[in-house]
Image (spheres, rainbow, N blue to C red):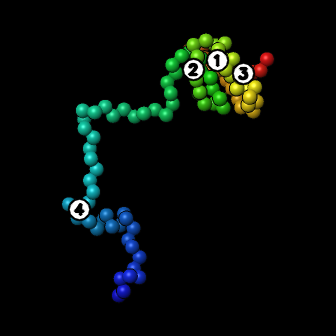
Amino acid sequence: MNTSLRRPRPVAASLLTLSAAEQPTLKKPNSDEDHTLSRQTREVQQRFVLKIDGQGKRSFGDKEAALQAGREIKKTYPVVKAVVYDSQEGINEDCRCS
């Protein structure tokens, strides 16, 4: 049989045919290291969080500052939804242009 016409074996199938000494091994992490998973979301640093289209963008210590930043964004991009979330009270307030 001509070996140049044979299809190469898939990688997974080729790993199954390797002996135990030839197979790649995964390194185990050191138990000394801290293996905390990183979070995709930022922690709330201050009480009021400005959310644009449901995503928290920035936190503020003052409600009026958060509302003003939301209004500025609404003036530039009127289609987006700008909301100020109060992390202590758990309520949302729309940033409407006045």
Q: Amino acid at mark 3?
A: Arg
Mark 2 or mark 1: which comes first in sequence? 2
- The answer to whether residue 68 is left or right of residue 62 is right
Mark 4 or mark 3: which comes first in sequence? 4
Inter-mark Cα distance, 4 to 1: 59 Å
Q: Amino acid at mark 2?
A: Ser
Q: Which residue is mark 2?
A: 59
Q: Secondary structure at mark 4?
A: loop
Label of residue 66 in the image: 1
- The answer to whether residue 37 is left or right of residue 60 is left
Residue 10 picture quarter: bottom left
Q: Which residue is mark 4?
A: 22
- The answer to whether residue 9 is left or right of residue 46 is left
Q: The N terminus is located in which quarter?
A: bottom left
Inter-mark Cα distance, 4 to 2: 53 Å
Mark 2 or mark 3: which comes first in sequence? 2
Q: Amino acid at mark 1?
A: Ala
Q: Amino acid at mark 4?
A: Glu
